[in-house]
Image (spheres, helix red, strand yellow):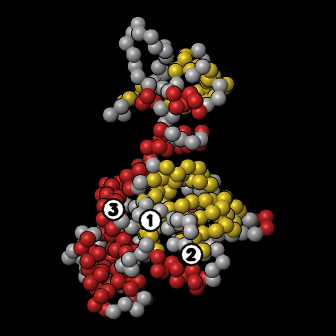
Amino acid sequence: ETLMSLIECKNINRYFGSGANRVHVLKDVSLSIEKGDFVAIIGQSGSGKSTLMNILGCLDSATSGSYQIDGIETAKMEPDELAALRRERFGFIFQRYNLLGSLTARDNVALPAVYMGMGGKERSNRAEKLLQDLGLEGKEGNKPSELSGGQQQRVALARALVLKPKVLLFDEPLSNLDANLRRAMREKIRELQQSLGITSLYVTHDQTEAFAVSDEVIVMNKGKIMQKAPAKELYLRPNSLFLANFMGESSIFDGELANGTVNIHGYCIPLSDSAQFSLPDGPCLVGIRPEAIFLAAEGSEAQHCEIKSAVYMGNHWEVI
Ligand code: ADP
Ligand code: MG
């Protein structure tokens, strides 16, 4: 018996439309998520993040490929089987809170438990405990219109947790909130995820947010997973030109590699051992992070450069 990951996708493709309007939205996506992982998914708008999340959360099915959750293959499931799986295992938090305006915070949180036929006492207890954990003590009886945006999103978070799901799926949950509140909320989400140890996937287009909440980040582009790695690895060891340009600022130069040294227009930089042995000699592209470049004292052995402009950015200067 092989050890299965909690979530395991193999070669998932998703097409929408038909005939000339057929679009290929997910392209051979393979992915494993272990129990307890917190993985962020980033990528430009339209790169397929929500489509992937909907399939993972059993809101949608792949056109081809295999998707197993907890060892259960979902590929050939009927819609009602899929819906049951979704209710049992997943909690969703979307950008729109979708709270019912006529219900109190407590009843909004308890609502999924009503559908599952849970008793009234147990429901209220669970809802109140979650609202307390999320810092909403005293607001249990408030209607959504009596709560701020951040408070409403915490009610939505509590509602997603009320059935004790195995996996939490966040799709741009903080996009409606202003910058300060977003920061506070992402800390709250991180704290909660760590205390519950709940497996979480978190879609955002905000790189800082992705780094702040997660252990690992998936970068998507045009329906493909480009790289899946901890933030530090993505930044220090991007696996492609796309990633090098995607993560932070970098300048790309034409270079020539020979004898463990890369030559950029006559300026030679020795490479570290690991880079030397993994790269073939010949023409190459060299990506340099701006913060890796230092100003040297006059007269020292350094490359002479001409500064075209320098902009003061507070904690650094941007020099071109
Ligand atoms: P993201 O969440 O990364 O912004 P989406 O997964 O929502 O991207 O969409 C990816 C692409 O798939 C987009 O080009 C979008 O227009 C297309 N798409 C998504 N859902 C459908 C659908 N139901 N029918 C047709 N095209 C769709
Ligand atoms: Mg989306």
Residue drawn at point x = 54 percent, y = 31 percent: 275
Q: Amino acid at mark 1?
A: Lys
Q: Residues within 10 Å of mark 3 (few under 14, many from 20)?
A: some
| Foreground disc of the pair 3, 1 | 1
Name the spot of residue 92 as percent of width and height, x first: 45, 72
Please say if 318 is above or below 258.
Answer: below
The residue positioned farthest toward the top in the image shown: 299
Q: Give whichever of discs 2 and 3 has the lower sequence position.
A: 2
User: Can I make out residue 28 in this image?
Assistant: yes
Q: Amino acid at mark 3?
A: Gln
Q: Which mark is residue 72?
A: 2
Q: CA distance from mark 1 to mark 2?
A: 15 Å
Instruction: Respond yes or no on whether mark 1 lies under 8 Å from ligand 1.
Output: no
Residue drawn at point x = 46 percent, y = 67 percent: 169
Q: Give whichever of discs 3 and 1 has the lower sequence position.
A: 1
Q: Residues within 10 Å of mark 2 (few under 14, many from 20)?
A: few
Which image quadrant is residue 15 in? bottom right
Look at mark 3 in the image and give the residue it sits on: 194
Residue drawn at point x = 26 percent, y = 84 percent: 125
Please say if 121 is above or below 320.
Answer: below
Mark 2: secondary structure: strand
